[in-house]
Image (cartoon, rainbow, N blue to C red):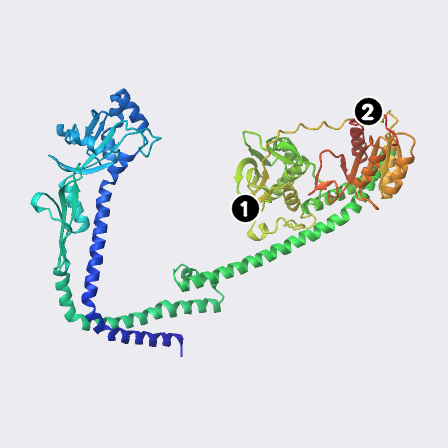
Amino acid sequence: MKVQTKILLLLFLIVLTFIGGLITMRILGAAKLRAIAAARAEERNRMFDEFLSERGDNLKVLVEDSTNWDDLVRAIAKNDQAWATATISDHTLATYRANAIWIYRPDFTLFTSINNRYADNLREAPLPPEALRALFAAQQPAHFFLRVPQGWMEVRGGTIHPSQDRLRETKAQGYFLAGHIWIDENIRRMSLFTEYKIRIVTGEEMTVGALSAEEEGQIRFTRDLAGWDGQRIAQILVEHDSPIIRQFNAAGRRLFVALIIFAVVLFLGLTISLVRWVRRPLRVISRHLQNEEPAGLVPLSRERNEFGRLAELILRFRNTEAMLLQTEEQLRHSQKIDAVGRLAGGVAHDFNNLLTAIIGFSELLEIRFENDPATLEEVRMIRTAGERAASLTKQLLAFSRKQLLQPVVLDLNALVRETEKLLQRVIGEHIRIAHELLDDEARVRVDPGQLEQVLINLGVNARDAMPRGGTLTISTQLLTFDADELVSRGIDSKPGEYVALAVADTGSGMDDETRARIFEPFFTTKGPGKGTGLGLSTVYGIVKQSGGGIGVETEINRGSRFTIFLPRETAPVEPPKPGPTRLQRTSRAQTILVAEDEEVVRQLIHAVLRDAGYEVLCAATPTEAIEIARQHKGAIDLFVTDIVMPEMHGPALAAKIAEIRPLTRTLYVSGYSENEISAQGVIDPDLEFLPKPFSHQSLVRKVQAVLADAAPGPVGPK
């Protein structure tokens, strides 16, 4: 038996039970009528009391508003009628739906008053002389009614105190009264609101207690209106003819037949509802799941019922499944980049050693064959090939975030302006460069050389997207990100202020498929031999290693916009380092100890420094370097060591040398960031470092700079 059939049988039994209970309902009808009448009477009273309360709420707010108490106390004390005229105005009356306001001094003489009926009888509060003192004897808020020529007036009042005494515990500094006239229009509106006949009665028409004869079809109840002395002076009389009993008696004769019809209609309605609210949603869910069309469940998921909730859960499950697939794809992508990064990092040390030797010895050969043009040209081709290979290694380390950074605090606007000329030469004169830079400094802490590389790579990418020319716009902007915004932009840093560097072009743009892969290494849309596919992946690696994030906005034939987000720096901009000086052979007798396990690099360093006029001591292992430091009779001015060494790494070896010769300076050389002198690829600014591969000129300049900073004094073995 189907579930739907079971439910229909259950409904039929329910209807039969319902019909069987009609007799019981008829017997209990009278009791229920009384209960209903009592409940309705209670509800009517509650609603009417709420209505009356709302009528006086504006007056209550006006009297209890303490915002102007201090000014009011001052005005009363100084008899400042100008302040009273300017502050207590017709606008005040209109705002709080009041018709009159009276303010009295502490001695109960009138300070000021205003009424919008322009009535002389309302210039003073229409109360007996003893009323004010009696009203405020205990400094309690006053609420009463009184009869004036204009009609019945509801009055609220309170004592005036400094604003710090909102509980009115100190001595009163004056008295504040506000009144609202209950005109016939008010009574008519109350009658319309309640649909009852409402009138105010006095004298003999007043009754004691609430009268209601609902069993006879008559509703009648009252509300007392108290005067200033608390005595009842009038009543609000509410009357309504509600012939419930007459209608009930007439309905009772038709009750049984009506309920039978109701039961049948109920059964039919429930049957139709069952088909509409249960069968239809189940068929919709089943059909879309079988057809693998979860999007068709979106309208059903908006319905606030169990099936809408079920459809929502199905959609959420499908979305979670899609997100898992996306996360899995991102994980594969991350693993792919990590694998390439590990490969790059693994070969970087040895590869950079070889490139150091190739470039360095090529430079030495250029000097020796400067009078042999043919040989010189071939040597230069060797050096050029080595430099291109070094650039490729640098890009591999950049996108894998394993390069060594030397960050400084700089003004991003200044860097953009300084790079403009170089960038213009790279992208060509057919592309115009425009700036939209901040007026203030946009300070960040980055490696200036790496950020210049980012700008150049983005410029080259924009150039390739605008073969017929266009505009390259570079802009900076200050933004503030919270934690959620940082996560959505893929920035692994703290919430706060960020500097946005945007590079936008007017080129061909990218489709979604291309945009999803632009940061992958070796992915390129250019033809064979026209690109390595490392430009944007290098940009991505540099930005991420610098603690920032990058976003892309693009549209086909509308251009692309790359935005880099870097944490804003509050430290002052560091002054630029002096440029390289002309190389000169040293005239001082200085000794340099070199520890390098790669023979060709060791020989290169020895040859370059010897030609520069230094005495060079070479060691192939840390043990040999320590022994030389102990045995050498003269001074050792500088210790040059590779970081990745057998037996022990460079920093540990440098510490050993420092124990033997504490005044000897140390210069580290390496081509790989995962080592002991850097954290996340960022070099301590107090350490002297020269990245591989290096030219012989950069080596000599670095050695000269380190020795120039050395403190004078005797240097010898410990």
Q: Which residue lies under the disc numbered 2?
A: 712
Residue 476 rendering spot, x and y as whole percentages: 56, 35
The local secondary structure at tag 1 comes to strand
Picture coordinates of residue 312, whole percent (x, y): 45, 60
**Residue lying furthest top:** 78
Observer-side mark, 2 or 1, equals 2
Does residue 372 appear anywhere in the picture? no
Given the image, on which type of amino acid does mark 2 rest?
Pro
Q: Residue at x 90, y 35 (%)?
A: 630
Taking the image as drawn, is residue 267 in sight?
Answer: yes
Mark 2 and mark 1 lie on one chain; the one further toward the N terminus is 1
Query: Which quadrant, please, contains the N terminus?
Result: bottom left
Q: Residue at x 19, y 59 (%)?
A: 37
Residue at 10%, 46% in the rendered image:
206
Q: Which residue is mark 1?
A: 554
Relative to 533, does residue 665 appear above or below in the rendering?
A: above
Please name whichever residue, 134 or 255, is drawn nearer the observer in this view of the structure: 134
Question: What secondary structure is found at the residue carrying circle 2?
Answer: loop
Left or right relative to 199: residue 664 = right
Residue 214 shown left or right of residue 297 in the figure: left
- Using the rendered view, name the quadrant where residue 250 is placed: bottom left
